[in-house]
Amino acid sequence: MFEKGDSTNRVGKDANRKAEESFVNNATIHEAKDTCRPGRSHNTAYEMYMDFTYGGHKVQKTQWALQQWKGGLVIKEEFF
């Protein structure tokens, strides 16, 4: 998983799961939705709107994710 061009912070399924669980355990999600999915192939992208509170701070943001799929699994994901 890449975040802002950095791929060193989450290598492997266990590291990604730990990071996502940490986010979910520290955030109160108000809204999250897939707002645009331009194509469905081995490489996909989607735009997502999120409204959540993290560490006591309310955050509203839109981000893009690029995904590479293989064998029905996401093998690479990068957020912008």
Image (tube, helix red, strand yellow):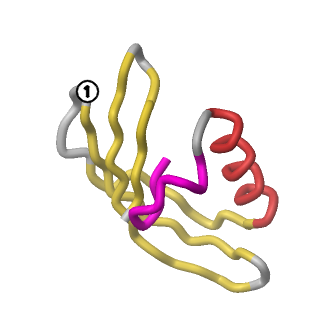
Res 15 → quadrant: top right
At 73% from the left edge and 66% from the top edge, which residue is drawn?
27
- Pointer 1: what residue? 42
The answer to whether residue 37 is magenta is no
Numbered marks: total: 1
Place of residue 78 in the rendered image (x, y in percent of width and height, measured from the top left): 40, 52
Looking at the figure, which quarter contains the C terminus? bottom left
Q: Nearer the viewer, residue 21 or 12?
A: 12
Q: Main secondary structure of the magenta part?
A: loop
Q: Residues within 10 Å of mark 1 (few under 14, many from 20)?
A: few
Q: Nearer the viewer, residue 16 or 59?
A: 16
Q: Nearer the viewer, residue 38 or 42?
A: 42
At 33% from the left edge and 34% from the top edge, which residue is drawn?
68
Left or right placement of residue 46 versus residue 54 in this view:
left
Res 43 → quadrant: top left
Q: Amino acid at mark 1?
A: His
Query: Looking at the image, is 54 positioned above or below residue 49?
Result: below
Query: Looking at the image, is 24 positioned above or below residue 18?
Result: below
At 35% from the left edge and 41% from the top edge, which residue is drawn?
67
Res 51 → quadrant: bottom right
Q: Magenta span covers which residues?
A: 1-10
Left or right placement of residue 58 versus residue 4 in this view:
right
Left or right placement of residue 4 versus residue 32 in this view:
left
At 27% from the left edge and 39% from the top edge, which residue is drawn?
44
Left or right placement of residue 54 versus residue 37 in this view:
right
